[in-house]
Image (cartoon, helix red, strand yellow):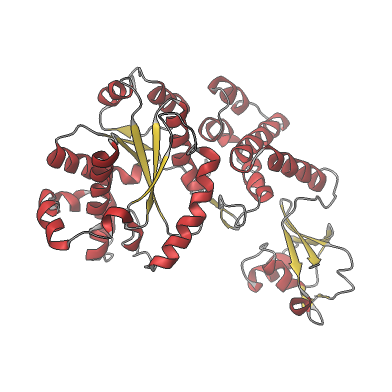
Amino acid sequence: MTYHPKSDFVAVMMERGFLSDCTDYQGLDEALMEGVRPAYIGFDATAKSLHVGSLIQIMMLRWFQKTGHQPITLMGGGTTKVGDPSFRADERPLLNEAAINDNISGIQKVFSAYIDYDTDAPNKALMVNNAEWLDNLNYLEFLRDIGRHFSVNRMLSFESVKSRLDREQSLSFLEFNYMILQAYDFLELNRRYGCILQMGGSDQWGNIVNGIDLTRRVLDNSIFGLTSPLLTTSDGKKMGKSQDGAVWLNAEMRSPYEFWQFWRNTTDADVGRFLKLYTELPVEECERLGKLEGSEINAAKVILANEVTTLLHGADAAQAAETTAREVFEKGGIGEDLPTLALSPSELGDGISIVQLIVKSGLAKSGKDAKRLINENGAKIDDAPLTNAGLMIDAAALSSPIKLSAGKKRHALIQLAD
């Protein structure tokens, strides 16, 4: 890529590795030089929290505001009722309105950590729900006024749809409508707020281009699209997943300590890239840290974990996580910030099996996984090897907290509830 950007935002996107593609680099650059301009990214409410896989988009919105422009976080209260089929093998489970609204409430908690909705500045962030315009659409009017601008032949050619059909996997008419609704979102945001840019992952390219084409046809306005790469780790794993499931951004679904630990466990080859994408350290410093080797790269991983955790959960949470990690790994202690399972008297009863405790604490997904962990010498209790899968834990054993470990990096405290 040899384009030399004029605007601060496009420059940041390029030098920090956010940019996969753009519909018109020069046009977008010039538009951003004219003053405060709005841009949006849409987030469907399919769970109570976003996970680390969405963090690259959240950071794009953060940088957009930091470079003087207005970010719009679009909540998919309407589109979630349909479900995005992009690159999926099957249809998403349909959620009712109450579940969608509950999920939106959970997701909204994260954004305020990264984006300023309360400032008096002209680039104050907006949070909008597309149910505002999608819920009340008249079907016949929508078909006549909007549907006529879409070519089915062209829609079938988009890679997100084509890959599904090539595998001879069903694509429902409901899902096929998703790209029309997303295109209509861009049209509405341009009409209501003057939004000139939609951003998203590269899997959204077809949907973004659809929205640009529709807005030009209906309103004759010039708007733009920009995508980020779909990230995988250097060992080929999808970003946002860990050994024990999705890395959620909400603290009640993934504790700050566990979140910190996810970043601390980054593979050596990913450190420099992740520092540029997920922190605000200067690019030169990110590159310097990413080139360290041996034990020095571990110090860079701690910096990465601290910086990312501070942005989401605050500096105190990051410091507590680092302190706990040091106590657990370097000193063999328990650590105050470890994920904790507090058992009520009814849960404990006359005793509970160690296998159940391993599952309840989140160190294994099932009893079968827990037994395999024990049999393969991967489990510890209070830092001693756990070899008896039939061990029962009673109230006397929990007179003080028990530390369970799965491998060297995953730990949990078990204690009696107050």
Residue found at the far front of this picture? 120
Answer with the quarter of the image where residue 36 lies.
Answer: top left
For the residue pair 41 and 234, the one nearer the viewer reads as 41
Q: Residue at x 45, y 29 (%)?
A: 121
Q: Residue 403's x, y, as percent?
A: 80, 60
Relative to 49, say whether 39 is above or below. Answer: above
The quarter in which the N terminus is drawn is: top left
The quarter in which the C terminus is drawn is: bottom right
For the residue pair 75 and 150, the one nearer the viewer reads as 75
Q: How many marks?
A: 0
Q: Residue at x 22, y 64 (%)?
A: 173
Q: Residue at x 37, y 64 (%)?
A: 92
Lateral position of residue 406 relative to residue 106, left or right:
right
Lateral position of residue 368 relative to residue 14, left or right:
right
Q: Is residue 10 visible?
A: yes
Q: Residue 116's x, y, as percent?
A: 50, 36
Relative to 42, say whether 229 is above or below. Answer: above
Relative to 390, say whether 313 is above or below. Answer: above
Q: Residue at x 25, y 53 (%)?
A: 181
Lateral position of residue 377 relative to residue 98, left or right:
right
Q: Is residue 206 visible?
A: no
For the residue pair 93 and 416, the one nearer the viewer reads as 416
Answer with the quarter of the image where residue 330 lies.
Answer: top right
Q: Residue 100's x, y, as percent?
A: 42, 62
Q: Residue 119's x, y, as percent?
A: 49, 33
